[in-house]
Image (cartoon, rainbow, N blue to C red):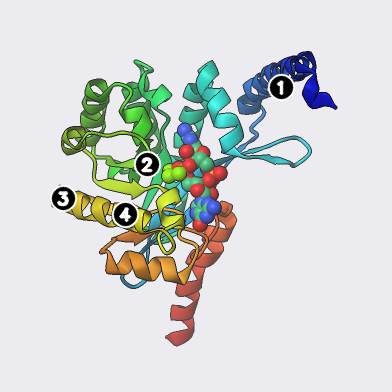
Amino acid sequence: AAKANPHRRTEFYRTELCEQAERQVALTKLLRKAVSKHQFRAHYQSKHAVEDGRLTGYEALIRWQLDDGVLVSPAQFIPVAEETGLIVEIGRWMLAEVCRQITEWRRLGYSFGRVSVNISGRQLTDPEFVTTVAEIIGKTGVDPSDLELEITESWLMVDPERSTEILRALRGMGFKLSIDDFGIAYSSMNYLKHFPVDVIKVDRSFVRDILTDRDSQAIVSAIIAMGHNLGREIVAEGVETRGQLDMLRSAGCDEAQGYLFSRPVPPEDVERARRMPLRQEAVAS
Ligand code: C2E
Ligand code: MG
Ligand code: MG
Ligand code: MG
């Protein structure tokens, strides 16, 4: 019955849009307070060598915990934080938190490789960005080569020349750099050659279909071959099955990350896992 009434449809969309806008405003207000209320957390997901599964590092992923304990996914609030510019402050908090955590883990004697942090392209447009990063590094005393900064391909392509400049500055400071979610945006091979990055992270959507879709498999193989020719390391995201991992191994992929190994976990869980080998050594001696 409703399908015959076009006004009703318009009405429906209008209400829907209003609700969406209202939600956006409400979310923005909550997000503004979240930094001062210490509601963000960093969780960590392990990365592994495809060859033998050994731990190579972690990716830090932000979590927003509301007063009632509910966790809001970054997929929901990062876009709003980017639109409102709040990402600049949130991103600064996140980097400082990860540096604090690295210092703590080093002090405890854990070996954990590099920790990567996601940087929004919106942060790169902040003229103070490089200075802010230098300050955090100076204050925490972290070695920049213990950190990897992940920037999505789509952000890098917004202004490739400017991106290249900033990446150069960051790399000059000693950071490892990676292109995140690679393959879903349009990158010309020429830019890829010029972006001074160490790592290319193949987007999860290709990994998901790698066993069932020939095109995805072809794309992943091509990214790996091209990346290696350019001297980059290749990390596959979203590896969930043994079969996907085997396929990635035969394609020559360097590292993998995904639920097959671990979900993102709070730092306490990382610490528990890192303590274990030490305990085993203690038992053996
Ligand atoms: P991303 O950087 O590509 O991170 C990988 C996402 O894939 C994470 O989602 C992770 O939990 C999820 N994932 C990992 N392995 C698997 C798997 O095997 N299967 C499936 N289905 N998913 C997997 P998460 O934590 O929800 O983060 C979503 C996105 O939010 C991130 O994508 C990143 O773009 C953004 N993000 C997260 N933390 C930050 C941050 O601190 N700053 C910024 N700017 N963005 C962040
Ligand atoms: Mg990432
Ligand atoms: Mg990614
Ligand atoms: Mg992704």
Dot 3 alpha-carbon crowd within 10 angstroms: few under 14, some 14 to 19, many 20 or more: few
Label annotation for residue 90? none
Lower sequence index among marks 2 and 1 = 1
Q: Sequence-wise, which precedes: disc 1 or disc 4?
A: 1
**What amino acid does circle 3 point to?**
Gly
Quadrant of the rendering where the C terminus is positioned: bottom left
Any mark on residue 231, and which? 3
Specify the amino acid type for callout 2: Asp
Which residue is at 39% across, 31% downward? 136
The CA distance from mark 4 to mark 2 is 14 Å
- Of helix, strand and loop, which one carries label 3? loop
Please state which amino acid type lies under the numbered disc 4: Val
Instruction: Tell whether 20 sits left or right of 99.
Output: right
Some atom of ligand 3 lies within 8 Å of the CB belonging to the residue at label 2: yes
Please identify, in this view, whether the residue under mark 3 or under mark 4 is nearer the observer: 4
Distance from disc 3 to disc 4, alpha carbons, whole Å, reads 16 Å
Q: Which residue is drawn at 52% across and 66% down?
A: 273
Element under disc 1: helix
Q: Is residue 29 above or below residue 145?
A: above
Residue tagged 2: 180
Queried on whether the Cβ of the residue with tag 1 lies below 8 angstroms from ligand 1, the answer reads: no
Residue at image mark 4? 220
Q: In terms of sequence position, does the residue under pointer 4 or pointer 2 come before the other? A: 2
x then y, percent, for residue 227: 21, 49
